[in-house]
Image: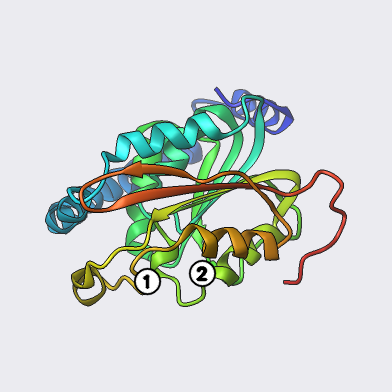
Amino acid sequence: MQQGPVAELARTLVDAVDADDPTLALDIERSEMIRTARAKFAADYFSRNAVQWDKIRSLYVDESEVERTVQEILPPGPIEDLLDVGTGTGRIIEILGPRVGRAVGIDLSHEMLTVARSNLERKSLRNCVVQHGDMYQLPFPNKSFDAVTIHQVLHFAERPGDVIAEAVRVLRPGGFLVAADFLAHGLEFLRADYAHRWLGFDDGDVLAWCRQAGLKARAPIHLSGEPLTVGIWVSRRPANDLAQPAA
């Protein structure tokens, strides 16, 4: 359950509303219609795209192992504000939502955002939202989040180093950046058929981008699949870093 002053204020406002208010009843009816429409869109979207996702996922370690590792490497204490860059279907904020105060996912795809909203509504994660946004120009002020995740996004980016630098701009001192993506590989069909801009990454390249952005990087984690291996790179912005990264 969401905790904190914002959640408490929301509960107070809800309790203060007259349950017999006709305007409220109409709003609830409209909200239910929207939720139903989103759920249908999500089901149709997955039906159309499941084959290609399943084909790619069969090439690497089970996604549940990646998700479990991401959960385990984040600090055990509370995370007040989490940002997921390129959130897609919202899976990362769906699994991390129960342990954070607020989670925000951004994506350029309106179709993906509709699917993500349906998934979050189904899980009743009211502390999690998704919105349209550009990973090169995040719509948030400097130092807005305690943790940022970038899950299977960098291989689509024209400038992955710039994506990391922009993520660091909105990361608070002491905050964590977690990036998960493929290690370098030679599967050219992923570039030709699935719009992958990069055929994975070397550890050295990702760690260099993190260090150039001012982060302190940990040793990378590798989750081996066949033939693709997933790399997870965890970095932290120094707690005494008072600099304002360039927007």
Residue 196 can be seen in this image: yes
- From the viewer's perspective, tell me whether residue 56 is left or right of residue 19: left
Q: Does label 2 or label 1 sit earlier along the sequence?
A: 2
Q: Amino acid at mark 2?
A: Pro
Residue holding disc 2? 160
The coloring applied to the image is: rainbow
Residue shown at the point (70%, 30%) measured from the top left: 9
Give the class, few, some or many, for how many residues have Cα within 10 Å of label 1's Cα (few <14, many ≥20).
some
Q: Secondary structure at mark 2?
A: helix
Residue shown at the point (53%, 61%) measured from the top left: 204
Q: Quadrant of residue 202?
A: bottom left
Q: Secondary structure at mark 1?
A: loop
**Residue 239 % position (x, y):** 81, 43
Q: Amino acid at mark 1?
A: Trp
- From the viewer's perspective, tell me whether residue 120 is left or right of residue 74: left
Q: Is residue 6 above or below residue 154?
A: above
Q: In the image shown, does 17 or 141 lie closer to the viewer?
A: 141
**Residue 231 % position (x, y):** 42, 49
Residue 29 can be seen in this image: no
Distance CA(mark 2)–CA(mark 1): 9 Å
Q: In the image shown, does 14 or 165 lie closer to the viewer?
A: 165
Residue shown at the point (25%, 45%) measured from the top left: 225
**Residue 183 % position (x, y):** 38, 57
Q: How many marks?
A: 2
Residues under numbered marks 2 and 1 in contact, where contact means CB atoms less than 8 Å apart: yes
Q: Is residue 110 above or below residue 235?
A: below
Q: In the image shown, does 188 or 100 lie closer to the viewer?
A: 188
Mark number, residue 198: 1
Q: Quadrant of the C terminus?
A: bottom right
